[in-house]
Each structure stands twice: as structure tokens, then as C-alpha cells.
Amino acid sequence: MDKENIGYCFLAIGDKYVKEFLSIAKYFPNENIVVCSDRELPGFNTVITNDPFNFHLRALAIGKALQLYDTVVSLDVDHRVTPFSKKEWSSLFNSFKKGFTTKWIGDSVEYLDENITSYDLENSNTKYEDVNLYGAELKNIINSSVKFLDESVMVFKLSDKEKELFMENYFDIISKTKNKQPYRFTDEKMGALEGCLIYSALYKTNITINSESNILGCHFYHYGPSQGHNVYTNKTFI
């Protein structure tokens, strides 16, 4: 497969998310997009699901894209992006190291106005029972400390063997945490803190995790959830 071949995957379930997807999709080649949605989206490689919204449904798009492309970029639809040409996008993502790349990875995060550390997550010290159950289960699955990472933009550059094993672990951990995944009441969405689960699948697969906060931060502005999904999405930034 041509090393310049890059897939871009999205999760767009519900009218609001589909509208955001269509706004951001125009900056990428349609033929290289894989989107998981509750409806057929003409002109795009669509993975249709009838399941109720859950952030972990992004795994369906990521899994399909990993079958088709050497490099896969997963993006939340609530982004503003630098308007690049196809060649410029290829140059940017092909410059990244092998493995997995995100904006940041760390031992703490702010969730629903509470600062949560890895220790809190694993030892049931948060004020949210679903978060406590989720953290304890992830810790049990990987037998190691669970970290947080920014899942809003992720770059996968994996070998075929890594792709297969990562997706096995990804789906397995989703299944094992099905009844313990956090519910974010502020926007009524299941599967919150999904970065912890993705980290767990990466850790279990022994995939190198890189951070490129400066590069990704320059080209991708994630306006949700802190600013919500009512931001005017057609505006780009420099």
C-alpha cells in the first residue's frame, strides 16, 4: 500500500454531529474518509450502526480505516482545522513517528469540574460512582496505572500485526467495561473518559505513545466540550 495513503475517520451519530461532520469533512479527501453514523452519508465510506450514541462507537470507524490505510487519523467532529491541501495533510501526518500520536497524555484531567488523577480513578476517589467502577475495571484489565490522553485527534501508524492486536484489545476492553462506562450528564452521552480505555488498549498492545501538542495544536482546535456544540463550525483559524 502506498505510504502516502491516509485515512480520516469520524463518529457522527445524530443530526447535530452529522452537521458538524459535514462541516469538517470538506477539508479532507472524501474518498479517504471513514465515518461511523446512524445513517448512510452519501459520498463517504459509512459504517452504519443502530446502537445508541456512545463515544466508543468510534472504534467501528477506526477499525475499518485501519484495514484500508497505513496511517489513520481519528478526529472528533467538533474541531476547527487549518485548511490544508491533500498533499500538505500527507506531509504533516507522514512526519509523525510510528506508533500512536496524540496531543497529550498525562496522569490527571478535569472532568465535570473535578480534577481527577490516575490514582483517584483507580482507587474510587472521585465523586462519580460510574467513573470509580470504570477506573477500577481498567486497572484490573491492564494490571497497571491508567493514564488519560486526548482522544479528540489521534494518529495511528501501526504495523499490520499491531493493527490486528490493537483492535482485538480495543473491542475486548469496550465489551468488558460495557456496564461501567461513565455517563456524562452535561450532554447526556455515554462512554465518557474514552481516552482512558484507548490508553488501556494501546498499553495492552505495547504500542508506543507519542505526544505532539505543538504540531497538532497548531492545526486542530477542539472547541468541545468546554464550548459546546453550538460554535459556528465553518470558521477556520490560522
Image: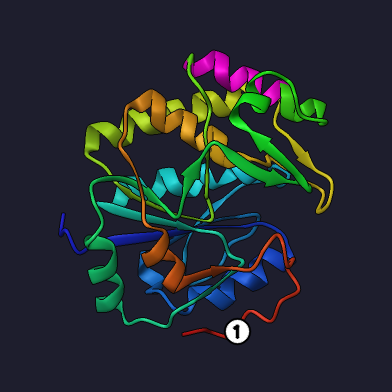
- The amino acid at mark 1 is Asn
Q: Is residue 2 left or right of residue 175?
A: left
Q: Nearer the viewer, residue 126 or 24?
A: 126
State the residue in front, 54 or 84: 84
The residue sitting at 24% across, 77% down in the picture is 87
- The span shown in magenta is 133-142
Residue 56 shows in this picture = yes
Secondary element at tag 1? loop
Counting from the top left corner in percent of width and height, residue 194 is at: 60, 40
Q: Quadrant of residue 136?
A: top right
According to the picture, the residue beneath numbered tag 1 turns out to be 234
Magenta stretch contains residue 110: no
Residue in the image at 46% along x and 50% along y: 104
Query: Which residue lies most toward the left here?
Result: 2
Q: Is residue 41 above or below residue 158?
A: below
Left or right of 63, for residue 113 = right
Indicate whether residue 139 is drawn in magenta.
Answer: yes
Q: Left or right? Give the position of 54 relative to 76.
A: right
Work out whether 216 lies above or below 186.
Answer: below
Q: Is residue 154 left or right of residue 206?
A: right
| Marker count (numbered) | 1
> Would you place residue 134 above or below residue 49 in this image?
above
Q: Quadrant of the N terminus?
A: bottom left
* Frontmost residue, 25 versus 197: 197
Report the magenta stretch's main SS: helix
Rendered residue at 52%/33% (across/down): 147
Report x, y in % for residue 200: 48, 29
